[in-house]
Image: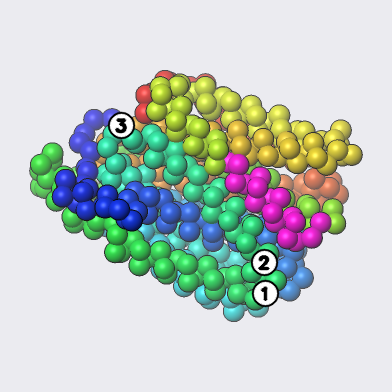
Amino acid sequence: MQGSTEILSAHEAEAHSRAGRVPPAFIVIAAGMVAALHIGKIPPAIPVLREALGVSLVEAGFLLSMVQMAGMLTGVFIGLAADGIGLRRSMLLGQLTLALASLAGAWATQPAELLALRAVEGFGFLLVVLPVPSLIRQLVPPSRLALHLGLWGTYMATGTALVLAAGPAIMAGVGWEGLWVTLALVSLAVAVWLLRRVPSDHTRRAAAAAATTATASATARAQWSARLRDTLTSWGPWRVAITFSMYSSQWLAVIGFLPSIYAQAGLSGQVAGLLTAFACLVNVTGNVAAGRLLHRGVCARHLLYAGFVAMGLTAFVAFSPLTAEAPVVRYLAVVIFSAVGGLIPATLFALAVHVAPNEHTVSTTVGWMQQCSSTGQFLGPPLVAWVAGVAGGWQWTWVITGVASVVGLLLASRTRYQRT
């Protein structure tokens, strides 16, 4: 993709590198991880919510996926808005939205109320995460972009793992309502961190004035219809978006229901949460590895192949009746499912930056990718839950994830080599 890359001025870069200071690029990644805490708080809370509010299994599936409603319906438009209103400003608004919705959720007394607030949280989540790849691109030199995007690809797994590990302990002390309040306070804290430590949108735009005139930049930002048209009429954004949906739908369906599956097997909530947290956390290794491999010039297509093949095979091992008497084997399969599958998101985030039609459509492209991903995540968990309810168990889960893996492989076969 042609065009200049916005970077911090030399004075700002020096200031941000002082001892004891966290670089702005890492702060925005951390903010994404905090947003992911809100996504991941439902899995460990499902057994508690089913008892406290009478949530059914299918309603639990929608609680897992309802947070994706905003992304499913408006992802590309929120990405478009983030490009226009300012990247840091979008992240701040998103964290405040997450905080308010989570606080309100602590007072919910009916499943329908939680479902509605999960949709609001989904809107806040998108406002936080959609600007991040474009913002990272402006905060780091091009030679380090793939490494940082690989780290960014870990945001969902890291945030989810943290709340899976800590959530049961927090709920044991202050209930599920206390968990909701705690995460609201964390979002407020990270909003203050963003405000104080990440350069404002105006400052970053001024730093880019030497490479592109302010008039041209403002004009490009103002032409929102052109940015939307450029994104949706290009094959590259469609390819990475649909591919992402094939990954995210099966990952959330498997990881999201693990605490419930283990609880049905007789494990305590704390043990189930820790096992699921570890299975979630190993996803980070795949993301980081993808960033390093892309930095070294490994073909993106090969990384996508490895991820989807591994997810398809290990899901079969994890849920097939053939391994019903081998719980350790099943758990190891889930760990590999998450770890090797982690190659996929980091690769797709890196590709999204490069397949965007121009530098002013990066957030819009990521928004479209998130919209398709959210559609998959919205449909995946309820579908898996419905099949489990009909079959009387989870033994056919691998069929659903297997279909997603096959489609992902077909899409990946059209991905050309790109040095990111």
Circle 3 sits on which residue?
Answer: 143
Quick one: SS at disc 3? Answer: helix
Q: Earlier in the sequence, mark 3 or mark 1?
A: 3
**Magenta-highlighted residues:** 267-283
Res. 178 in view: yes
Mark 2 crowd level (few <14, some 14–19, many ≥20, 10 Å Cα): some
Is residue 361 placed above or below 304 in the rendered structure?
below
Q: Amino acid at mark 2?
A: Ala
| Residue 148 percent location from the top left of the image | 39, 40
Res. 218 in view: no
Residue 394: mark in rendering: none
Quick one: SS at disc 2? Answer: helix
| Residue 316 percent location from the top left of the image | 75, 33
Q: Amino acid at mark 1?
A: Gly
The residue drawn where x is 40% and y is 43% is: 366
Q: Which of these two is toward me, 293 or 81? A: 293
C-alpha distance separating marks 2 and 3: 42 Å
The residue drawn where x is 54% and y is 61% is: 38
Residue 169: mark in rendering: 2
| Residue 97 percent location from the top left of the image | 43, 67
**In contact (CB < 8 Å): disc 2 and disc 3:** no
Q: Single out the residue that lies furthest toward the front.
A: 19
Magenta segment's dominant SS is helix
| Residue 163 percent location from the top left of the image | 59, 59
**In contact (CB < 8 Å): disc 2 and disc 1:** yes
C-alpha distance separating marks 3 and 1: 46 Å
